[in-house]
Amino acid sequence: VAIAMLEDRGELDIDAPIANIFPEFAHHGKERITTHDVLTHRSGMLMPDFVRNPHLWGDRGAIQRALVDTVPSYPRGTLAYHPYEYGWILNEIVLRVEGRNLPDFFAEEIAVPLQLPALRFGLAGRDMNSLAFSYWLGKEKVMVAGVNVAEDFEKQNSALFLNSRNPATSLVSDAASLSAFYEVLLSGGRSPVGERLISEEILHQYTSREVLAWDKSLNTVLAVGRGFVIGTRFPSSFGWWNTTQCFGHAGGFSCLAFGDHSTNISAAI
């Protein structure tokens, strides 16, 4: 949604190469990768080695070097979900276009106007003991984007993990706030007091299906819009049958939130 707002304002061309604003990114054959490719998880960019080093996630220089040095795992255009990479790349784009990082942009331009103080990246001053932690039951190998997520899964229950503020992984909220956020998207991008955050036309483009293909990272069929996972006619995260009008996302194997265009209902679990 932050990227959609920058596009809507004319500050970002999502179909232009990322290298136009981040020249070093072009190394190792990445000169044609666009923001649009990243939004639809088709950049081919996976960084499993960097993912295994959470102590580096709070270091922008280390993140930049990793983004520059990474050789794409797949050809551009291949659907391969970017569980961590998504946030690092988009955060760098927002920083270079807007001057603020994506979590700060989100707080100031989205969460505050929507009066959703619980919707924040990282701890944001909250006590770790006030959060619900996630645990992995069993240690069978489960590979996602080249990383065994069953190994050291509980690392997400740490201040180090959350305060890295990777926009792809560190949102801390509650179900009521998250559902209220999706309600705004269903209302065409208007806040509860009628303020428009984003044009309805751009928002529709982000919450509609663009890709339906076999996902190389998840080893399943996945439908995606621009950032949002989209429902399908067959079983999806949002229900058993015909959830094609749903858009949303799951997180950390422990939560799910979505909006449903067909019923105008938002939900967070």
Image (tube, rainbow, N blue to C red):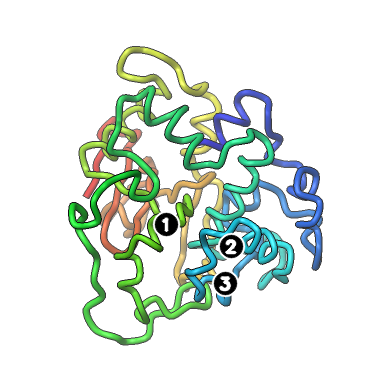
Quarter of the image for residue 135 reads bottom left
**Label 1 environment density (alpha carbons within 10 Å; few <14, some 14–19, many ≥20):** many
Q: Residue at x 35, y 71 (%)?
A: 155
Q: Position of residue 109 (x, y in %)?
A: 47, 27
Give the number of the mark in front: 2 or 3: 3
Front residue of this view, candidates 144 and 210: 144
In what element is the residue under mark 3? helix
Give the number of the mark in front: 2 or 1: 1
Q: Residue at x 67, y 62 (%)?
A: 67
Q: Which numbered disc covers residue 169?
A: 1
Q: What residue type is labelled 3?
A: Phe
Q: Which residue is drawn at 29% across and 65% down?
A: 157
**Label 2 environment density (alpha carbons within 10 Å; few <14, some 14–19, many ≥20):** many
Q: Residue at x 51, y 34 (%)?
A: 105
Q: Name the residue under label 3.
A: 50
**Label 3 environment density (alpha carbons within 10 Å; few <14, some 14–19, many ≥20):** some
Q: Earlier in the sequence, mark 2 or mark 3?
A: 3
